[in-house]
Amino acid sequence: MLEIKNLSVESKKHINLLNDISFSLQYGESIGLTGQSGAGKTTLIKAVMGILGKTCRVKEGDILLDGLGLAALSSSQRRDLCGTTLGYIPQNPMTAFDRRIKIGKQIIETFRLRLRLSKEEAYHLAVEKLQMVNLVDTSRVMESYPLQLSGGMLQRVSMAILLGLKPKYILADEPTSALDEDNRDMILDLLMNQMNDSGILMISHDVFALESLCEMILVMERGRIIEGGPMEKLLLLPKQEWTKKFSAANIKLDRRKWEWMEY
Ligand SMILES: Nc1ncnc2c1ncn2[C@@H]1O[C@H](COP(=O)(O)OP(=O)(O)OP(=O)(O)O)[C@@H](O)[C@H]1O
């Protein structure tokens, strides 16, 4: 179980970015995070991954992974968890890749390092997983540099890596934001299949994605969780102002076409 206990994060200038966040994610469960832009959703996922950077820090609280406190780990122990224990799909997939190295090499090296595979085994796994995310022209994709691929293609490459690594917990920051409807549905199906082997925390503004994948949705505002529940309840009985606007904007739309609208 991934437990977030009374977590507060502040910036270097002592501005609170997260305030007293508590919830837990069970293995086999999927939780959605939504809310206003700047509410702190990405900061929360970065705090769990241990990649907040130098401009902010955990001020209070604990993050426990199967009972193990992450704050007590060294940076190399923390790094070892990334990939096979904690899998991350960043909001901007370009940040996940080294621009100077071809995509194929980056996937193969990740699989070799994290799964201790031979070069040949890693290559075959890369081809298999790229095909699973509908990147069927695998040679072209693997021979490309990150800047030669679209944001949507890079999002699917991130997903292919995740599928290969099979992490225990998946932290996905808007994993379908750059995708068309067919590819979005395909990624959601793959994440749903992965739920047998992982707990999933997914940030999204897409009502359809949240409703199809997540049993529980948490709404964030100004660094706090302000409301939570299944999507149907949030849409039909919203309590907070933000959720009421979100519901009003989405409930009128056809269910298949629900999508994010900025207020
Ligand atoms: N490293 C940082 N140092 C200082 N402030 C930061 C840092 N990272 C994020 N912030 C601030 O923290 C707040 C929360 O940002 P965050 O990216 O977590 O929001 P979000 O809910 O993910 O937004 P969006 O939906 O637009 O991605 C914002 O006001 C942002 O400017």
Image (cartoon, grey):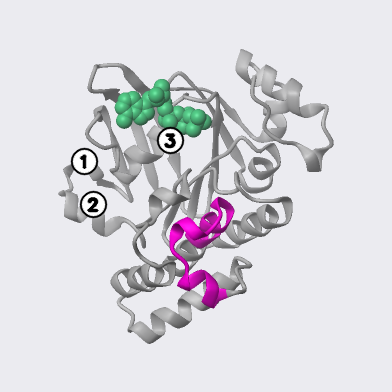
Residue at 34% in and 42% down = 48
177 or 220: nearer the viewer: 177
Q: Is residue 102 magenta?
A: no
Residue at 25% in and 55% down = 79
Identify the main secondary structure in magenta: helix
In terms of image quarters, where does ligand 1 lie?
Answer: top left
Between discs 3 and 2, the one toward the N terminus: 3
Callout 1 amino acid: Ala
**Judging from the image, what secondary structure is the residue with disc 1 in?**
helix
| Measured Cα–Cα span from mark 1 to mark 2 | 9 Å
Q: Position of 251 compared to 211: left or right?
A: right
Q: Position of 207 compared to 23: left or right?
A: right
| Measured Cα–Cα span from mark 3 to mark 1 | 19 Å
Mark 1, residue position = 71
Residue 202 seen in this snapshot:
yes
Beta carbon at label 3 within 8 Å of ligand 1? yes
State whether residue 95 is above or below residue 244. Answer: below
Between discs 1 and 2, the one toward the N terminus: 1
Mark 3, residue position = 42
The residue mark sitting in front, 1 or 2, is: 2
Categorize mark 2 by other alpha carbons within 10 Å: few (<14), some (14-19), many (20+): some
Q: From which residue to which does the magenta span run?
A: 138-159
| Residue 78 badge | 2
Image quarter for residue 98?
bottom left
Residue at 47% in and 45% down = 92
The residue mark sitting in front, 3 or 1, is: 3
Q: Is residue 140 magenta?
A: yes
